Image (cartoon, rainbow, N blue to C red):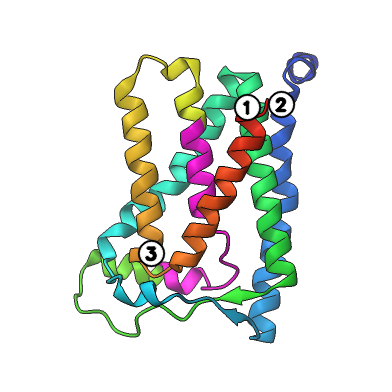
């Protein structure tokens, strides 16, 4: 136990992980609040209607969870300074998202009622729809956090000469962003606001420091 406390004393950036104790209860409360009241502002752009549903994008959509966990844990245990920047990047963006969803409950009505195909990917999407409500959407955390982790990967000394890893991260990031729209989980508006928020935080966290 003493060794653990000593390790944490020299790696204080690991305490950033405790933000999950704030984010998860707050997010769950927002989801419950919207579902009980059934009163939210509908997010929609004309471009949303031209994007077809494609169930195969459920693969990168779910890979987001592994991407986030692996990226954050790796950075946390290999580069303390970069972890502080990544942590500030993530925590600030997610807090902005929580505040927006609190004062401006929002959702979308883009999900298809029927599916043109019947396959395992459609079944996975149906389970996703059943467990994840189409509410509290912007800026898209899927988009924002994917960009944050990809930036950290590209700035990590551990991946400095590993071009395959960097390119793989970038490709996965783009695939995840596209998946949010092709699965009808997010409006283009959510994606764009997620990108804008990430761009602003990049300027604050990396460029001006």
- Dot placed on the residue nearer the N-terminal end, 3 or 1: 1
Q: Left or right: where does residue 187 sit relative to residue 34? A: left
Circles 1 and 2, Cβ within 8 Å, touching? The answer is yes
Element carrying mark 3: helix
The rendered magenta stretch, by its main secondary structure, is classed as helix
Percent coordinates x, y for residue 111 in the rendering: 40, 78
> Which of the pair 180/189 is nearer the observer?
189
**Residue 140 on the magenta span:** yes
Query: Which residue in the protein does label 1 denote?
Result: 83
Separation (CA) of disc 1 from disc 2? 7 Å
**Residue at label 2?**
13
Question: How many tags in the picture?
Answer: 3
- Lower position in the chain sequence, tag 3 or tag 2: 2
Q: Residue at x 40, y 77 (%)?
A: 46
Q: Residue 155 location in percent, x, y?
A: 50, 23
Residue beneath the point at 55% across and 33% down? 72
Point out the stretch of residues depicted in magenta.
128-151
Q: Is residue 119 above or below residue 112?
A: above
| Res. 163 visible in picture | yes
**Of marks 1 and 2, which one's residue comes earlier in the chain?**
2
Q: Is residue 3 above or below residue 15?
A: above
Mark seen at residue 181: 3
Tag 3–tag 1 contact (CB < 8 Å): no
| Residue 111 vertical position relative to residue 60 in the rendered view, above or below | below
Q: Position of residue 3 (x, y in %)?
A: 75, 13
Mark 1, Cα crowd under 10 Å, few <14 / some 14-19 / many 20+, is many
Classify the position of the C terminus by image quarter: top right
Q: Is residue 70 in view from this perspective?
A: no
Label 2: element kind: helix
């Amino acid at each position: 136990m003493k060794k653990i406390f000593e390790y944490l004393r020299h790696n204080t950036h690991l305490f950033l992980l405790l933000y999950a104790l704030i984010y998860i209860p707050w997010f769950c409360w927002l989801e419950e609040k919207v579902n009980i009241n059934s009163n939210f502002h509908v997010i929609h752009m004309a471009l949303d209607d031209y994007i077809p549903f494609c169930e195969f994008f459920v693969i990168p959509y779910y890979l987001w969870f592994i991407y986030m966990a692996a990226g954050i844990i790796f950075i946390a245990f290999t580069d303390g300074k970069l972890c502080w920047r990544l942590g500030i990047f993530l925590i600030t963006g997610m807090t902005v998202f929580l505040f927006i969803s609190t004062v401006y409950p929002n959702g979308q009505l883009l999900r298809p009622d029927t599916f043109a195909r019947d396959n395992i990917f459609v079944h996975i999407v149906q389970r996703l729809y059943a467990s994840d409500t189409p509410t509290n959407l912007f800026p898209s955390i899927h988009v924002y956090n994917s960009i944050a982790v990809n930036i950290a990967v590209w700035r990590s000394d551990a991946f400095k000469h590993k071009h395959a890893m960097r390119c793989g991260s970038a490709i996965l990031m783009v695939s995840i962003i596209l998946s949010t729209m092709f699965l009808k989980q997010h409006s283009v508006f959510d994606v764009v606001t997620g990108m804008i928020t990430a761009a602003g935080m990049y300027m604050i966290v990396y460029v001006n420091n």
